[in-house]
Amino acid sequence: MVETLLKLKSLAQGALVLFLGGVDTGKSTLIRRLHQELGGEVLDADLGQSEIGPPTCVSRGDYEHIEESYFVGDISPRGNSVQLLAAVGQVLRGAKRPCLIDTDGYISGEAARALKGEMINLVQPDLLVLLQRRGELDYFKLFARKGIEVLEVKVTHQGSKSREERIRAREESFRRYFRNASLRRWPLKGLQFERSPLGHGEPVEPALLEKILGCPVLGAWRAGAELTVVMDGYPQALGAAKELLQVEYIHLINRRELEGLLVGCLLEGRLVGLGIIKGLTSEWLELLTPAEEATLLQAGRLILSEDGRHRRLVWPGDHNRDRGP
């Protein structure tokens, strides 16, 4: 480790350095020690085991202060490659050098190689550090032909954290983050939603839909040939609703499916905090968040409780879309 650290110190002076490695190969430990020696900033792109900023975010700063964060909304890069690459690209802007980029342990398979390869193309690091045990990252040595210096670090120690320990660490990170959060009540009219069909299009009178669907409707919006309905119960007569409103698709979202949903809170295009949806009416949204104000909410893919327990969620609009006959 001492020899590796000395070599990295000489190569990383004033550089943009990207670290790749599987789970428990020591990326975060090495980056922390290198940061202590060189200063600069760390960009943490490990969504599930972040050390800078809360889980589900890509954050940049140091171990005491966060300069900028971008909400990806999940604890895994799987299925979130577009958001993850967008996050890294945005958070990297204005980074101080040296900037050390930590990544997750998702390295096996074609999808993982494609994601990490495009991350290298996006970042264009001065130095690419490969922490590997048995040649599992040899593929990425091809980037030396693109003018990127590649340094291989042999890992001999075995992983020390179990899956359960990683989950407990993430739960503790969530608990710390929301420890000083407040329950806030924001009017729906003042909010916009991203990464969900909520609130987009022309409002539809809930009372009209309640008569047709036979259940309470908290909100509904028509955008082109699509209708989004937030309801409290189980609907009926979907065909009649389509015919009356002349739509082809209906997104059905049950109010209970929104409770506990983790969201990113943005103000003037910048992430100002995370929030947990606690309640929803036709006029108000109740949110547990440290953010004092927000104008846009980004929907995540986690259901989260205040004690840190969480489960991944497929956004209702992805699979709860009624196409009809």
Image (spheres, rainbow, N blue to C red):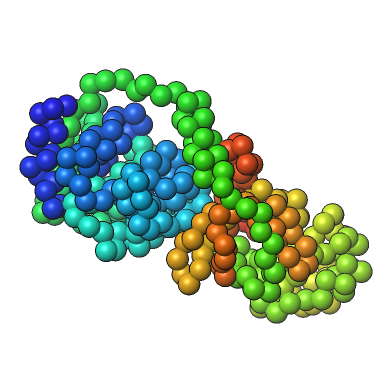
Left or right, 137 with respect to 89, comes to left
Left or right, 241 with respect to 268, comes to right
226 above or below 41? below
Across and down, in percent, residue 112 comes to 36, 43
Quadrant occupied by the N terminus: top left
Q: Residue at x 46, y 69 (%)?
A: 269
Q: How many marks?
A: 0
Across and down, in percent, residue 144 comes to 12, 48
The quarter holding residue 70 reads bottom left
Quadrant occupied by the C terminus: bottom right
Across and down, in percent, residue 266 comes to 51, 65
Q: Confirm whether residue 202 shows in the render.
A: yes
Q: Residue at x 44, y 51 (%)?
A: 57
Left or right, 53 with respect to 324, comes to left
The quarter holding residue 136 reads top left
Q: Residue at x 27, y 63 (%)?
A: 94
Viewer-nearest residue: 258 or 2: 2
54 above or below 108? below
Across and down, in percent, residue 319 comes to 65, 53
Q: Confirm whether residue 275 shows in the render.
A: no
Viewer-nearest residue: 133 or 104: 104
